[in-house]
Amino acid sequence: MRPHVEAIQDDDLVWHRVELPKGSGNQHVVQRNLSFDEEDGSASTRLHFRKAWSRPGGFHDADTEWYIMGGRVKLGNRILTKGCYWRAPAGLAVPPIQVDAGTDILLFREYGDWGFSVSKKDRAKFISRGQNTVSKARGELTIVDSNRMEWMPNAYEGDTQRFLKLKPLFHDPASPKNNNTGFITMLAWAPPGWSDNRLVHHPVFEEAYSLEGSLDYNFGHAEAGTYFFRPAMVKHGHFVAGEEKGWWGVFRLDGDLINWITINSKVIIEGDAINYDPAVNPPVISGIPVRSRSVGPWDLEGQ
């Protein structure tokens, strides 16, 4: 299970050796780990290609997604630039790939580690999984250019004027038949000045990487490069988007989004100190998530 991460700024994270086996030029590619599941290898990472890189066609051990934040990627015969996205389920044949120097991507993988094989004989071990994250349907290569898409009203809310606008990049097509547990990846946009004063939580995890603009909410301030991974059932809100650009970023869920809403919420911590001085050793709330150092310390009294 991944830990709860809120308001992490990726500039505060260290660069690691990249996890792209069989790649040519790996010594010139670095990776920042935004969040990581030590049990099954699932991860969300940011990669920077200092020099050109390439890899032959093959098969991933994990369901794999790339979102191009800048630069140029050639996947088979397709040229992908800023704003483009591709996804391949584990065991599906992926074309050869070439990446230009200076390219930045977000790489997500689920239910597997960084393993990659160029041998067709290894493909058979994935067939029992149905070649998709959850569904029994045979998976396929998904390639999307978000620059050619229009922002659509938020499909997860009835009030389409008040809530976020979306560009869906991927939705496991069989998820409604699997108790709404299929993965969803999309771009989300909060227009300038957008706000929502409710406290919400969901039965699915959600994560987001901020691409542009700013957003203030109960866990802090999000701007370009800010990331969170929030497990299911964690309450969050009130949201206020920046007045100049609003906020937009890459948004992922492991199922259909259902908003459970809390209003008139209060957080009260009371008790009698027995063997410590509350002024010197103040208590903290259990379960506070990982936080980026540039965001600053938690304002527990303000919370």
Image (spheres, rainbow, N blue to C red):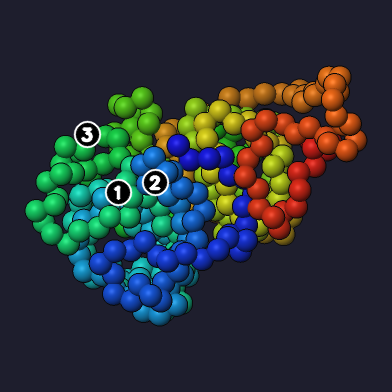
> Which residue is labeled 2 in the image?
42
- In this picture, is 12 found above or below 73? above
Q: CA distance from mark 2 to mark 1?
A: 8 Å
Tell me if label 2 and label 1 are in contact, CB under 8 Å: yes
The residue at 49%/36% (across/down) is 205
Residue 207 visible in image: yes
Number of residues whose C-alpha sits closer than 10 Å to that of mark 2, classed few (under 14), some (14–19) or many (20 or more)? many
Of the two numbered discs 2 and 1 on the same chain, state the one appearing first in sequence. Answer: 2
> Which residue is labeled 3 in the image?
136
Front disc: 3 or 2: 2
Number of residues whose C-alpha sits closer than 10 Å to that of mark 1, classed few (under 14), some (14–19) or many (20 or more)? many
Tell me if label 3 and label 1 are in contact, CB under 8 Å: no
> Which residue is labeled 1 in the image?
62
Of the two numbered discs 3 and 1 on the same chain, state the one appearing first in sequence. Answer: 1
> Within the image, what quadrant is residue 249 found in?
bottom right
Q: Position of residue 69 (x, y in %)?
A: 48, 65
**SS state under label 3:** loop
Q: Is residue 22 left or right of residue 7?
A: left
> Within the image, what quadrant is residue 254 found in?
top left
Amino acid on which the number 2 mark rests in the picture: Ser
- In this picture, is 286 found above or below 20? above
**SS state under label 2:** loop
Q: CA distance from mark 3 to mark 1?
A: 16 Å
Amino acid on which the number 1 mark rests in the picture: Ala
Q: Quadrant of the C terminus?
A: top right
**SS state under label 1:** loop
Of the two numbered discs 3 and 2 on the same chain, state the one appearing first in sequence. Answer: 2
Number of residues whose C-alpha sits closer than 10 Å to that of mark 3, classed few (under 14), some (14–19) or many (20 or more)? some
Amino acid on which the number 3 mark rests in the picture: Lys
Q: Which mark is residue 142?
A: none
Question: Depth check: 203 or 259 in front?
Answer: 203
